[in-house]
Amino acid sequence: MSTAHDPWWRSAVIYQVYIRSFADGDGDGTGDIAGLRSRLQYLAYLGVDAIWINPWYPSPLADGGYDVSNFRDIHPTYGTLDEARKLITEAHELGLRVILDIVPNHTSDQHAWFQKALAAAPGSPERDRFIFRDGRGENGSEPPNDWHAAFGGPTWTRTPDGQWYLHLFAPEQPDLNWDNPEVRAEFESILRFWFDLGVDGFRIDVAHGMVKDPALPDLGLTEFSVIAGEDQENHPHWDRDGVHDIFRSWRAVADGYPDPLVFVAEAHVRPGRLAHYLRPDELHTAFNFDFLKCALEADKLREVIDRTITDLAKVGAPATWVLSNHDETRHVTRYGRAHTGVTTPLRDRHHPSDLALGTRRARAAALLMLALPGSAYIYQGEELGLYEVEDLPESALQDPTWERSGHTVRGRDGCRVPLPWTGDTPPFGFSTAEAVPWLPQPENWKSYTAEANQADRTSMLQLYRSALRLRRTHPGLRGEDFRWLDSPDGTLLFERGDGVSCAVNLSEQPLPLPEACTVLLASGPLDSGLLPADTAVWLQQD
Ligand code: GLC
């Protein structure tokens, strides 16, 4: 339900579909639109409001599809534009909105524009769509500056005629020049193309990286630390004020449609800066990476929750909450470790994880996240209780980080393993029985399938379903009311509307529950009026 005052996106629960790994309809081992269409009923059964689909455009898949070679088509492995249209219609019929991923910071090196730029002369209009520069040093053989690329190595690659081009990510992902009006016009046209096809919004990839300081000054970096540089003020390529002009014009495009179309930013920025992206004439929402990265400790969570709500309220934007995505270690694994936060940008491997503990905590975290006011993101498979697959054979690894780091950082494949749907052995209904999924699934995922989860009243899936049903139907969880109540150290207790409250016990002591309350939902068994450690509960005042 959505009204002018309470538009759907302010409280939506959005399910992230990593299409390569969601469901394979044609048996080639890679997920696709046919597979997604065949599982839409499952998403309706789960009870989410919308789906966000990771890039599905034609792409050489140098970075899992974040290297787009044509922004107006579908990768043939995933299907066709006609199937995309059908998917959108069918999703809408089930009450599910559809959000796409747009990748405006860079293209694929196979994109027609970049191929033309390579063929054209230095200084040509074709090259001006990207960021080409002469090198430094003798014969220009040194890169134009000292910036580091996100997956390792320099941000510059030299072309046969001696010039260099900039890529904040892999060399196969040349950065676009957003000072060029042609680039701006092209992306507004791409937005319209998909809006006209019926999509309800976009997740904006690397929204904080699109504008660069034209002087391209050195950063003085000594080691691989492109993400760490995000903390720096007046950074030459992160979070520059110029990005806001772009988003204002994008907002005008979206507002030109009768339906409320939305943007969600992927912007890793310093505390306090996110609200700038969410001013009333810019983007609607942004991912809350502070929440995702936060250790599962009451005082730290409380601080992040407070800061989020207060900062965003200043611009009238709702909070969002997220525990996992396709770039981070799955939270069941993170929460089973001694240090539960995200401590490194790409991975914190080789730290043992107690998966039973991680699962218990993940259940509690789900009830925390889904009780908070605002919108929430579920990464495919978290509702099945999946953990990070940390022992993928090296020969299977596909994330560019593995090669670019000289085989020292395995990268993000462990959270991208194809979903288990049914049955006792791989491919667990992800694909046809003979198919080989593009990443191998663990042999022991039998108890994690959607089928097994459906059959077990106490499963992660049933917990998510119950929580989502309550979120939809209980008036106390629908509005944006939120108030902390006193509770002992190591615990969180807050009230929403209509006498609904949520208690989370992250201490080692059992927590006595408030009196005169009925339990609406609990993440684990209660112990005669006490909330055990690593457990959360939703309560209704009697
Ligand atoms: C974003 C995506 C990530 C991708 C990168 C480059 O961070 O989430 O998967 O590798 O952008 O496009």
Image (cartoon, grey):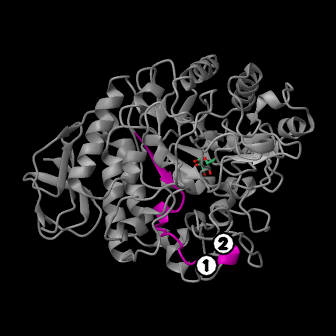
Q: Are marks 2 and 1 in contact (CB under 8 Å)?
A: yes
Residue depicted at 76% across the width and 50% down the height: 172
The amino acid type found where label 1 is placed reads Gly
x, y percent for residue 235: 50, 34
Q: Nearer the viewer, residue 1 or 390?
A: 390
Q: Nearer the viewer, residue 58 or 372?
A: 58
- Residue 129 vs residue 55: left or right? right
In the rendered image, the vertical position of residue 539 relative to residue 285, given as above or below: below
Dot 1 crowding, Cα within 10 Å, few <14, some 14–19, many 20+:
some
Q: Is mark 2 within 8 Å of ligand 1?
A: no
The answer to which of marks 2 and 1 sits earlier in the sequence is 1
Residue 429, label in figure: 2
x, y percent for residue 68: 75, 44
Q: Secondary structure at mark 1?
A: loop
The verdict on residue 386 being magenta is yes
The quarter holding residue 408 reads bottom right
x, y percent for residue 370: 36, 48
- Residue 304 vs residue 133: left or right? left
The quarter holding residue 125 reads top right
In the rendered image, the vertical position of residue 504 relative to residue 483, given as above or below: below
The amino acid type found where label 2 is placed reads Gly
Residue depicted at 69% across the width and 51% down the height: 170
Residue 512, label in figure: none
Would you name the residue on which mark 1 appears? 423
* The residue stretch that appears in magenta: 375-396
- Residue 154 vs residue 523: left or right? right
Is any part of residue 503 visible from this angle?
no
In the rendered image, the vertical position of residue 56 relative to residue 307, given as above or below: below
Q: CA distance from mark 2 to mark 1?
A: 7 Å
Residue depicted at 13% across the width and 52% down the height: 517
